[in-house]
Image (tube, rainbow, N blue to C red):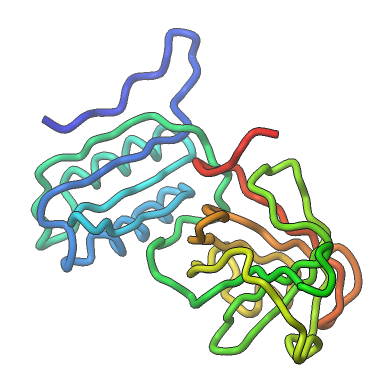
Amino acid sequence: MPHTLKQPAESGEAIEAFRATVRGGVQGVDYRAATVDRARELGLFGWARNQDDGSVLVHAEGAIDGLRQLHVFLLAGPPGASVHVVDVKETKVEGHEQFAIRGVSAGRFVVEELASDPASFVLRLEVDGAGRAWRLTKPPSMVPADKRFASGLDDSALPGSATNTWDAGTYEQGGRVPWPEAIDRGHAVFVLHGDKLKGGFALQRTRGSGPTAGWLLIKRRDEFAQAA
């Protein structure tokens, strides 16, 4: 039988977030997209992802009434879906800015360490087929409190520089504003799938403009975040 959301605790504290695994005929029938649409209608935040085992994983956070209504939707799904089980568990709020689709790669990322200067690292993101780059004096951290200063970098500014790959993988774009507009506005949210770096990150511009502006690279508080 599917799990159901618990009632608010006796103290009056309401559930603020849940994670649901939905099993059955839920891929290839727009279940994920319909879930995102319904969650946005309810004013919820979070994400939905198609899993390799055929299930759909949903993380939702917001007002308790909205969460309950989304749970009712997950049990039925859109036309054409055949939901067998919805396994719901309470989880911590991650602080998302919208309800988005996860699992669709936006391209590659790489973090390089300059062989000529061990105190310098370069974060590169593939954005619409072009490279965007930021230079850091320390490697990115999985601890949200460890903010890393990053300076915007012309992607061709280090021609011929010897580098060592510190981490690499694919990434997903996030946030309310589409890319590359999010970068141009100065606040870009994304999810990394690397060996060392996993989960949500944000680039926040702190000063200047153009390719050499100053930024902060920040690990977002999610299931991959580490304690200081």
Q: Quadrant of residue 67?
A: top left
Q: Is residue 9 above or below residue 94?
A: above
Left or right of 221 in this view: 32: left
Q: Position of residue 108 (x, y in %)?
A: 52, 76
* Quadrant of the frame with the C terminus: top right
Q: Residue at x 76, y 61 (%)?
A: 204
Q: Nearer the viewer, residue 138 or 190?
A: 138
Outermost residue to the top:
10
Q: Quadrant of the N terminus?
A: top left
Residue at x 91% of width, y 73% of height: 208
- Residue 61 at what x, y percent from top left? 46, 41
Number of numbered discs: 0
Q: Nearer the viewer, residue 172 or 226?
A: 226
Q: In the image shown, does 219 or 100 lie closer to the viewer?
A: 219
Query: Residue furthest toward the right?
Result: 208
Vertical side of 6 occupied by 177: above or below: below
Left or right: 141 as drawn, with respect to 35: right
Residue at figure coordinates x 28%, y 34% from the top left: 88
Residue 158 drawn at (x, y percent): 79, 86
Left or right of 62 on screen, residue 65: left
27 versus 76 height, above or below? below
Q: Nearest the camera: 110 or 210?
A: 110
* 188 left or right, relative to 76: right
Q: Is residue 186 above or below residue 78?
A: below
Query: Residue at coordinates 24% horizontally, 40% vertically from top-left?
Result: 72
